[in-house]
Each structure stands twice: as C-alpha cells, then as structure tokens.
Image (cartoon, rainbow, N blue to C red):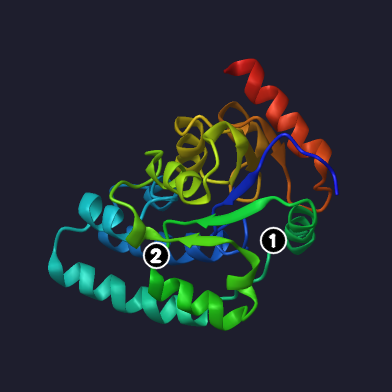
Amino acid sequence: MIELPFQAALFDLDGVVVDTEPQYSVFWGGVCREYHPDQPGLENRIKGQTLDQIFDANFESPASRADILKRLNIFEAQMEYAYIKGFEHAMNWLRENGIYTALVTSSNIPKMTCVYKAHPEFKQMFDIVLTSEDFTQSKPHPECYLKAATKLGVAPAKCLVFEDSFNGLKSGRAASMPVVGLATTNPASEIASLCDVVMDDFSHFDETVCLLALDHFKKRS
C-alpha cells in the first residue's frame, strides 16, 4: 500500500466511468434539433446538467417534457454502458491503497437502475453513490462534490475529482478540489484550463497522475 496525500476519489458517471457521452450526443442532438432548430450545439451546452435543469431551461411545455422523458427512458434502457478504458484497473488501485470512492452524478435513480442492470458489481465499487435526487443545485455548482466530501468525512482539498464535461470540471474547481480531466467528451486542449491534469482515459492511471494533480492544485490555491 502506498501512502498518498489524498483520501477520496470522486467520479462523475457519463464520460468518466461509462462511455456513454457519444450516445447521449446522438439522442440530445436529435431532440434539440427537433425542438430548438434555432440553437445549434445546444446538446453540448447541456452536458453535465440534471434532467430537471435541462427541462427548466429549454423545454417548458408539459407535452414536450413528457415526450422527451418517454423517449429518454427507452433510450437509456437500450444504451451500452461499457466502462471507460482502464477504469476497473483504477478502482482496484484506489481500493488497494485505502482511498474512499464516490460516484457523484447528475443522473437520476431510474438511469442508475439501468447501469446496475448492466453492471451488477457497480454498487460495490463505490463507498457512496450520489444522484440528482441528492442535490438542490446542479453542476457547475459545487454542492454535489462538497456533499460527497462531507458524507465521506474528508476535507475538500483531500478529494480528487474525475470529470469530463465543462460543467463538471467547473463544479470540482468551485468545490476547491484537485481536478483530473478526462478528454473523453471534449478535446484535452479545451478542458486543460479547467483541471489540474488531463488524461485520455485510465489506461496509465497510477500515483503519478494523482500526485501531479495535487501538486498543480497546491500551486494554484
């Protein structure tokens, strides 16, 4: 076991744990072009938001919400939830080194039911799982990550956040936590300014990545 200067690893879900963002881009791209043809790229701007937040800001009609929710439930039940490359290795490494793990996602409980069905081992991989039902504010607000730290009993500066979306990266930063950005959804060049270190995936994850993120975090704090 390696003695590490942090105590918890906090993970977003889509684009960090499971490779679902390309699938969501297809779904929300179709929905946004149908309902908001005058707002190209809207599907990218809503990444990291809860469904309620997306609805409140972009879909006011009860009929449109009901239609989208029905289609989304069907879509998520049929989605593939493959792990991001190297993720299981990273989780094993963290566990072996005594690091707490938490899932901090804007996804709701019905969506997580689909994830659990695809991965029966999923719940056992994390010490806690927080979903959209646990928060009053959505990313980029820091509430979700601060709540995870409180539940784990770990100071924010001792938590390492793993995120891919702009809103998620901003949320980790706003929580005053070291942030590792994954270039799975957006190019590394576009997220670099919002995180302390960038990875393509978890293929080469080890203590070097963690220590580099912590070092950069200290320098900017």
Quadrant for the C terminus in the image: top right
At x 51%, y 37%, the residue is: 172
- Residue 218 sits in which quadrant? top right
Depth check, front residue: 75 or 146: 146
From the image, tell me which residue sits under label 2: 30
**Horizontal side, residue 67 vs residue 77: left or right:** left
Residue 83 pos. (x, y %): 68, 66
Type of amino acid at the residue the image marks with label 1: Ile
From the image, tell me which residue sits under label 1: 84
Kindly state the secondary structure of the residue where label 1 is placed: loop
Depth check, front residue: 101 or 167: 101
Residue 177 pos. (x, y %): 55, 33
Relative to 169, does residue 103 appear above or below in the rendering? Answer: below
Q: In the rendered structure, which disc, 1 or 2, sits on the residue that comes first in sequence?
A: 2
At x 22%, y 74%, the residue is: 66
Residue 118 pos. (x, y %): 59, 80
How many numbered marks have been drawn onto this rendered protein structure?
2
Does the rendering let one see residue 8?
A: yes
Type of amino acid at the residue the image marks with label 2: Gly
